[in-house]
Amino acid sequence: MERALELANRSSSQGFVLLGFSANQGIRDVLFLVFLSLYLLVLLENALVVYLVFSHRELRKPMYFFLGNLSCLETCYVSVTMPTLLRGLRSSPCHVSFTACIAQLFFFVSFISTKCSLLATMAYDRYVAICHPLHYPLLMRPQVCRGLALSSWLGGLLVSALKTTCIANLSYCGPNVLNHFFCDVSPLLNLSCTHVALVDLVDFISALAVLWGSLLVAIASYVAIGRTVICMPSAAAGRKALSTCASHLVVMGCFYSVVLFTYSRPGHVKATDLYKALSVIYTAVTPACSPVVYCLRNHAVRTALQETLNPHRVSQEMPPPTASLKLKGEIYGI
């Protein structure tokens, strides 16, 4: 017992060393510029989406409310990992304290769990809009939307608190070197010198519950949407309904395919260069692509963006009432 406390105290005082990406200084400088540009792009894109959603009356719909939450979330969780990555590229290896490492782990797990819930909620929103369009204003009224969003954020905090507490109470023998560019679950478990079977089990069950639970909700929603589209009398109506889901399907497919491969297995897995490369995809690349995918495929968002960039031109090109009614139908997914 005394030995375990000594090791824990030593871990807390020494902190951890993040190896990051092993390369010569020239390559690291190039990577630094690439990731810095990507980070700034993510901040700019998602801030623009949040501004458009909350400043334009025509975007004050459930679909865009959840999109605004998703953009806020991606701004937060990319800010948890990217500064450490950039710091490691400038001064490799990167030293972090035990407290800072655990705090980074807590916020990262919380945000990624919240993103899973929000993606599932957005799939459910599309299900209600397409399969039950007449009941959509009631089923997705503002109080329900706020409750769904709040439960996603609070659920992420709860899952993260459970996992982080278990990992923070482990003892680390050293050398406290993490083969990663931020403090993630598997690299930390690999350094523990105490029995981690229980922690592995908690990590595995929570990953299955969050990842697979949200994925099953999304899959069930889109299966129901597919059945409804098949039964539609008009092929044009079916294509219009599916077009409102295309952006979400692309973002969700890219995110889940990488995250499930990384986390839906026992946590005591060696971190490799492939592991780090996949982590870059869902921590940096996906947040940069999501706003572009949503904006390019959504007429209402494109119109709001054009109005923001060039308000005088848009005011001269206001659509006739029939076009406005058509746009309202597209917003509800019918």
Image (tube, rainbow, N blue to C red):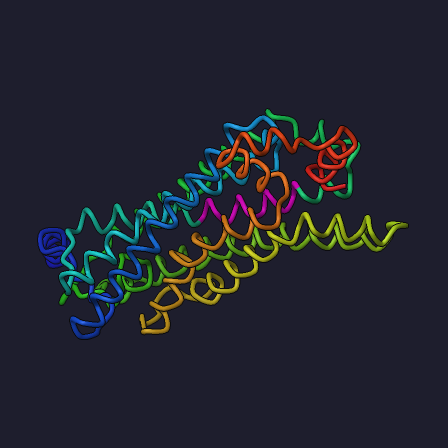
Q: Residue 85: x, y in percent?
A: 25, 58
Q: Which quarter of the rendered picture does the C terminus lie within?
A: top right
150 relative to 97 in the view: left or right: right
Q: Residue 331: x, y in percent?
A: 68, 37
| Camera-side residue of 100 and 31 | 31
Residue at position x 45%, y 48% in the image: 113
Q: Residue 286: x, y in percent?
A: 45, 56
53 relative to 77 in the view: left or right: right
Q: Which residues make up the magenta segment? A: 113-125
- Asked which quadrant contains residue 193, the reply is bottom left
13 relative to 29 in the view: left or right: left
* Residue 48: in magenta span: no
- Asked which quadrant contains residue 59, the reply is top right
* Residue 114: in magenta span: yes
Magenta stretch, main secondary structure, is helix
Q: Which quarter of the rendered picture does the N terminus lie within?
A: bottom left
Q: How many marks?
A: 0
Q: Residue 312: x, y in percent?
A: 54, 30
Residue at position x 43%, y 45% in the image: 45
| Camera-side residue of 16 and 265 | 16
